[in-house]
Image (cartoon, grey):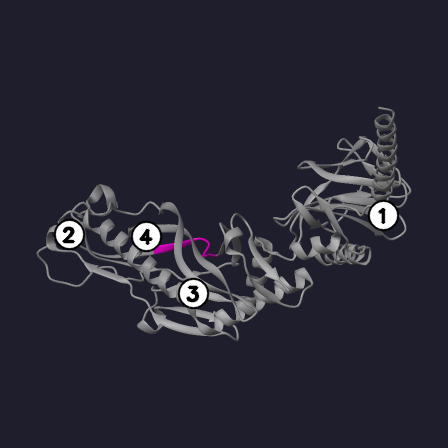
Amino acid sequence: MKNLVSISIVFLAVLVIYMSGTQSANANEDEGADLVNTEIELERVVHFSGPKGDPVTLDAGRYRVEKRDSKTLELSTGDGASHVIAAAASEHDEAIGDAEALSVAMGNDAHRVLLLHTDGTSWEAVGTYSGVVSRAAVAPLSRTQVNTAYKSRLQTRIESVPTIQPQAYEGGNQVAETWQQKLERQRAGRITSTLLRNAIGKTFSGASLKANACGGSYTYRKTIVNIPNTLYKEEGLQRLHYDLSNGEREKTEWTIDERKLKRDVKGRRYSIRACIDNWQNRDWQGQVVNGLMEVHIPFGDASITTRTIEYWSTTGFHVVGGPRWNWNDSAARNAIQDRNLSPVLIVTLRPKYSNGKITYQANDAKWDLRMNMWSRYGRFRLSPAEPDKIYSYMNSNLEILRGRYLAIFNNQNVRARLSEDLTDSLLANNYVNRITGIDEANSGGTVITVSYD
């Protein structure tokens, strides 16, 4: 019995010593732990403004940065104290795997705290060391400045990485993740909407898409695709010219009350014409949706222009003669209302990896049509046959344009250039040398996951 008691006392003593050493080691480890993604270290006192303009002073030390709402950031310390400071929304180009906080000294008396999110949005708070706050608007950091600050933070992490030692925990022997390992894991970067827009801006700088069917001769009625130093193509485009039948003409007859002319004058529609009236694209946009790249090509305010030829007589309609109005008369232009549109062509590209580059497969193109009403009052009501003809013309030509503009992205030169610009943007934003693939299983939502060496 005495031996058993002695053994128990020795065991407890060893256990106490072991636990004390473990706690001490853990305390020392925590004290020198690296900053996590959303933590910053202020090396001196910085004065910020609160959400209502009240002064907020932060002592030197470590803070965790979180977005509180659309206009504020919350900085909290390890002991539970928190401070809310005013912040402005902005955008960034960094391809990050998790939210990142940055602490940036600016000259002798300015300091910025930023919180970057993975979708390209960011929030930026402006502070000073002196406590003097200017009432003038302060511009946010440029994308280049944010890039420099983020790159500096990554380099600091790499330089401070300790030697990796195996550690045991429940489930078997594992290697504890260090910042270096985490950086490798984060190199499964992202194609975001911001990054896609940058690539599109380079590839299609100065690009022009035009569609016109209202020209006086066939040589003027065509689509023109012009992407400088990449693609130039012209293709013909038809306009609608429809002669009404005798029965249809009778339904268009107008009288003295509508024309305000002589009492014995009557008029009828003779034929109608409709055409795509000089559509021209505006700035191209890019968006990542559900793991696909979308290129948005807006055409601004466009229209299907309509004209008519009328003829009229003081002796009824038994006379033989040509039309009273030709196509270029103002009366012909204003007789029928134009159909106004605000069309945006959305081209969907499925990203692919090939030979160290990000390329794509052109999936589809569709119109986002914000239909406006018929413009202008028009002199006469359309006969039943005329709206159907105009709508049929509009829909068939929208399909023609859809196919022609989708073909742009299947063009070998365009594909090569967009792939090059997209790859360069990815490499520049992730500070790596080679892309190794796309993780299609995780390429959902507003980002596309890409892996690197």
Which of pointers 3 and 2 lies earlier in the amino acid sequence?
A: 3
Between the C-alphas of marks 3 and 4, the distance is 24 Å
Residue type (three-letter) at the residue carrying disc 3: Lys
> Which is nearer the eye, 426 or 171?
171
Q: Which residue is mark 3?
A: 210
Q: Position of residue 113 (x, y in %)?
A: 78, 45
User: Magenta segment: does it hold 297?
Assistant: yes
Report the mark closest to the observer, 4 or 1: 1
Residue situated furthest bottom in the rendering: 229
Q: Which residue is mark 1?
A: 110
- The crowding category of the residue bearing disc 3, from other C-alpha atoms within 10 Å (few below 14, some 14 to 19, many at least 20), is some
Q: Which residue is mark 4?
A: 334
Q: Main secondary structure of the magenta part?
A: strand
Which of pointers 2 and 1 lies earlier in the amino acid sequence?
A: 1
Does residue 307 lie above or below 135 as drawn?
A: below
Residue drawn at point x = 70 percent, y = 53 percent: 182
Q: Position of residue 302 (x, y in %)?
A: 41, 55
Per the image, label 1 sits on a secondary structure element best described as strand
